[in-house]
Image (spheres, rainbow, N blue to C red):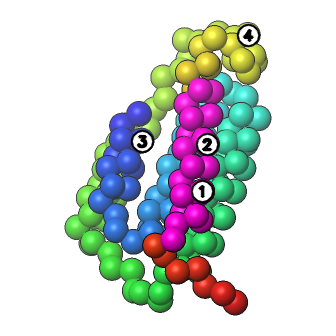
Amino acid sequence: MSMIMIMSIFFMMMTHPIMMIMSIMLLTLYMSLAFYLFSQFSLISLIMILLILGGMLIIFMYMVSLSPNNKISLNWMMLISLFFMLVFINWEFHFENIKNEILNKIYFFCFMNLIMLMMTYLILTLFVVLKLTNSNMSPMKMT
């Protein structure tokens, strides 16, 4: 859980839209890996990767087409601190106490919070994409 917090904090510190989308993609990959290690059921993590990363790639293509060719300025201190946090973080997942017969049920009560979080995240992403595409403040390139 601390890795998710660290990646979320670094997401808020980024200023370039392409770097923000790349950090969201990394966060999604980490969350799906953690969910797979938690449940030993790859279907939910695969669906999460396909839906969220597919949507992020669409947003990525939209942002690349609208943003000018600016050089991405990297904050080297932030990258060095991220590297050291990744090295020293505890990568052990403590999910051994959960019984395996519970993990095979997708809509079991213990997964309802996660499923609701995923649905809320997808709805929020949909609203952000709608807001970006319907905005009259930014120019739409005609090709």
Which range is magenta? Answer: 115-136
Decide: marks 2, 4 in contact (CB < 8 A)? no
Of the numbered discs 1 and 3, the one sitting upstream in the chain is: 3
Q: Which residue is mark 4?
A: 101
Horizontal relation, residue 16 to residue 114: left or right: left
SS for tag 2?
helix
In this orientation, which residue lies closer to the viewer: 2 or 128? 128
Residue type of the residue flagged with mark 4: Glu
Q: Quadrant of the N terminus?
A: top left
Label 3 Cα neighbours within 10 Å, binned few <14 / some 14-19 / many ≥20: some
Question: x%, y% of residue 136?
Answer: 51, 71
Mark 2 or 1, closer to the camera = 1
Instruction: Work out how far the residue at label 3 is from the one at label 2, CA to CA, in angstroms.
Output: 18 Å
Horizontal relation, residue 37 to residue 83: left or right: right
Does 30 sit above or below residue 139? Answer: above
Residue type of the residue flagged with mark 3: Ile
Of the numbered discs 3 and 2, the one sitting upstream in the chain is: 3
User: Residue 122: which numbered mark, if any?
Assistant: 2
Instruction: Work out how far the residue at label 4 is from the one at label 1, CA to CA, in angstroms.
Output: 41 Å
User: Residue 4: which numbered mark, if any?
Assistant: 3
Mark 4 or 1, closer to the camera = 1
Mark 1 or 3, closer to the camera = 1
